Amino acid sequence: METTRSYSSVQNAQGYDPCITSGSERQSTSAILTSKVVSQDQSETLPMPPVSVGVDHVNGQNSTARVPHHHHHQKPLSASDLPPATMHGPNLRVAYQGVPGAYSEAAAGKAYPNGQTVPCDQFEVAFQAVELRIADRAVLPVENSLGGSIHRNYDLLLRHRLHIVGEVHLPVHHCLLALPGVRKELLTRVISHPQGLAQCERTLTKLGLNISREAVDDTAGAAEFIAANNLHDTAAIASARAAEIYGLEILEDGIQDDVNNVTRFVMLAREPIVPRTDRRFKTSIVFAHENGTNVLHKVLSAFAFRDISLTKIESRPNHNRPMRLVDDVNVVGTTAKHFEYTRVLRTRSEVQEFTSFLRVLGSYPMDMTPWSPSSSTSHTASS
Ligand SMILES: O=C(O)C(=O)C[C@]1(C(=O)O)C=C[C@@H](O)C=C1
């Protein structure tokens, strides 16, 4: 995957650099989406198919005269008939939080192998990059097999209007990195992303590294910081790729406490996708409800009555309006496949009746690779 320069603010992001495919390309995506409706209407109501005025002018001809009669009833080629070039392939720009070598970059590469990664210094910026059409997708870590949900990122999902269009599970293999020649005994500090520190805490202690821990924005950023400041007393917890990029040495390999350390990332886009029926889709829903009305029971029943599996339900205290997050699975069975999505839609409208707020974050194909061997059954478990 290619990498473009990092975005550090919205202002920067708006003044994007020329190596990134221009915003006008992205505008055409919106044109594709809107013109789909408009052009269909036009083909039925307008007396004439659209003709390029520029060409007519050059030829000195009247556009009506140039249009062969049989074209009047032909549906004009619209942007929606063209392949959505910006949706796939090498031009897809994928924003992530961090610098090259971050796990989020690896997740972006796993999700979109031919895409072009766009590093952003904050998650907020990654969201805005997609909203402002500087990027086409964003990847966001939402859950770790060891530490559970990353609530801050779910809050971001709620504050923004992007849709979840996919998920990837990334095995996270941490290394302890330091400048070449540095010995462990000389270290006074370990720096990393808070998740990186949390995922290696026990191993660090076992290695005798009872030294100070400091949190930074991302794992690879920690490696970059050590290299940029020539810090001989500091180690970073980051990927082997970060060691390579920033010229650090791997002091310890595989220092995550759990050998099956996996982080779940979601892919975000401006437009939602409609679930297909030939594979398993997951739908993530967030809702809030007033206290004391037995709402949770009713909501869970709405899923249970329709045999919809829940992979996860989580409660978030939000003053007196508890927030719940639900991932349900649209099971593809051998019969009545196409009713599955309708079933989810019906459940949604029923749940809406009991709740004060409901948002469907997205329906997306499930990543069927194991979450972690110890919890691999959670995909199909009903709760
Ligand atoms: O700092 C990084 O490299 C990230 O991509 C972030 C992140 C996270 O937020 O959980 C991603 C995967 C690992 O769990 C550790 C850190």
Image: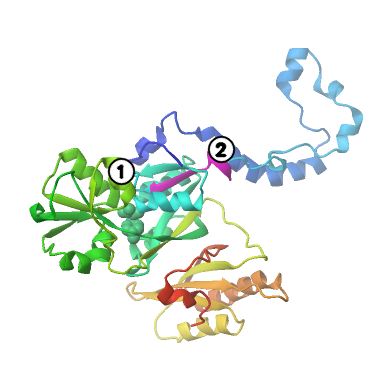
Q: Which residue is painted at 15% across and 40% down in the image?
A: 230
Residue under label 1, please give it.
Answer: 244
Badge 2 marks a residue whose secondary structure is helix
Residue under label 2, please give it.
Answer: 27
Mark before the other along the chain sequence, 2 or 1: 2
Residue 252 shown in magenta: no
Asked if the residues shown at circle 2 and circle 1 are in contact, with their CB atoms under 8 angstroms apart, the answer is no
Quadrant in which ligand 1 is drawn: bottom left
Q: Nearer the viewer, residue 309 or 269?
A: 309
Q: Nearer the viewer, residue 79 or 379?
A: 379
Badge 1 marks a residue whose secondary structure is helix
Q: Amino acid at mark 2?
A: Gln
Percent position of residue 227, x then y: 20, 41
Could one spot residue 271 in this view of the protein?
yes
For residue 208, side relative to residue 359 (left or right): left
Q: Which residue is painted at 85% across and 38% down in the image?
A: 74
Label 1 neighbour load within 10 Å: few <14, some 14-19, many 20+: few
Label 2 neighbour load within 10 Å: few <14, some 14-19, many 20+: few
- Taking the view exactly as shown, the residue that stands out farthest to the right is 69
Q: Nearer the viewer, mark 2 or mark 1?
A: 1
Q: Amino acid at mark 1?
A: Glu
Which stretch appears magenta? 87-96
Q: Which residue is painted at 41% across and 30% down in the image?
A: 17
Q: Nearer the viewer, residue 298 or 93?
A: 93
Percent position of residue 47, x then y: 83, 35
Residue 215 vertical position relative to residue 4 in the rendered view, above or below: below
